[in-house]
Image (spheres, grey):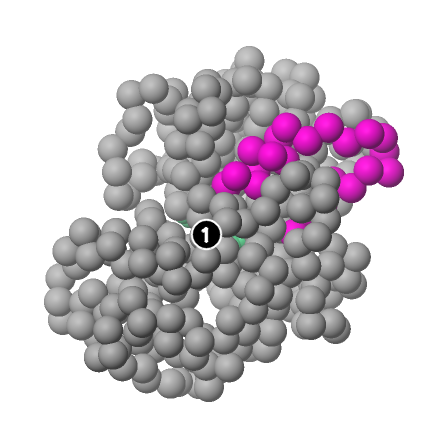
Amino acid sequence: MKALVTGGNGFIGAHLVDLLRAEGHEVRVFDRYPNRFRPERPDVEYFVGELGNHHEVEEAVRGIDWVFHLAYNTLPQTSNDDPIHDVTSNVVATIQLLNECLKEKVRKFVFVSSGGTVYGVPQTDLISEDHTNEPICSYGITKLAIEKYLHLFQRIHGLEYVVARFSNPYGELQNPNAKQGAIGVFLGHIAREQPIAIWGDGEVVRDYIYITDAVKALLCAAQYEPKDNSSPRIFNIGSGEGHSLNQIVETIRSVVGPHVTVEYTESRSVDVPINVLDIHRAKTYLNWQPEVPLIKGVEISWNWIKSLQLAKS
Ligand SMILES: NC(=O)c1ccc[n+]([C@@H]2O[C@H](COP(=O)([O-])OP(=O)(O)OC[C@H]3O[C@@H](n4cnc5c(N)ncnc54)[C@H](O)[C@@H]3O)[C@@H](O)[C@H]2O)c1
């Protein structure tokens, strides 16, 4: 297949590109920036462009079978600052991309949504895809709006899609200086010999999934053939297990050593107390399951972060 990965130079996109190439697919990346941690691959076609730019997107979609849509302009933590920007740069730009996909008769559109934000405050310990959707940040609302447009485009135009509601992916190539991604950010602090900063008391529980497991789910999603209109097209993608930030720190200590120190600061309004995804649907329909245990994933991530030789403070 010929695959387009929007945001293919980002953390998740770069791993997806590697997997697609390893599986023999042709890959085109559409991204506004290069990857910050590695050079371009010689066996991948790179298009530099902006999602909102109609002509650039039109060119990028030409001749494509599968579109993996990962480029996104906002983050959960800051999206409430400018909801208009969130809607125009993500929802409107994605609808433009969908129109191009229709013209090119794209076979499958895979969208990376967010299991951490589209449900809002969980009503159950384990969140299934049927849980109510009451996002408490604009980012969750725009992700959900795009999911609804995908449903609409499938119903009225027959554009096949899969939504992958990711939990918290972590691993190599995750920017340790970013505003999200607790494990990568914590390891970055340790590499710089700084204390880990935790908002709140560290009892916030999340579902962490190692990046290679997460991108395998995207490939399974592209290969998935729904039987009819009522077949599921929305899937939670996570480990299905919850770990508090304090437990993550303990896991990190067991890999890095006991010297790791933590500073606790005030909690943030966008942090729901617990978010763990029920992944049974993805296991059943996508024939997928996560394989990398947390300790192994942290070990690989730490070795990579050390190789960056971050400046010590
Ligand atoms: N990382 C997570 O914890 C997480 C969790 C759930 C969902 N997601 C979603 O997964 C997707 C990828 O996330 P990531 O962690 O790899 O992010 P990332 O920031 O590492 O990568 C995103 C890439 O998209 C590109 N991009 C952004 N806006 C663009 C635009 N308008 N035009 C062209 N390129 C643009 C960026 O240059 C970047 O290379 C996003 O849609 C994100 O919302 C991420």
- Residue 203 is a magenta residue: no
- Residue 223 is a magenta residue: yes
Bounds of the magenta span?
Answer: 215-236
In the image, residue 108 above or below residue 253:
above
Residue 230 figure quarter: top right
Kindly state the secondary structure of the residue where label 1 is placed: loop
**What residue sits 74% from the left and 73% below the top?**
123
Figure disc tally: 1
Camera sees residue 246: yes
**What residue sits 37% from the left and 22% below the top?**
44
In the image, residue 65 above or below residue 205:
above
Q: Quadrant of the N terminus?
A: top right
**Residue 65's spot in the image, x, y percent?**
59, 19
Residue that mark 1 sits on:
292
**Residue 7's spot in the image, x, y percent?**
45, 38
In the image, residue 125 above or below residue 214:
below
**Residue 136's spot in the image, x, y percent?**
65, 68
**Residue type highlighted by circle 1:** Val
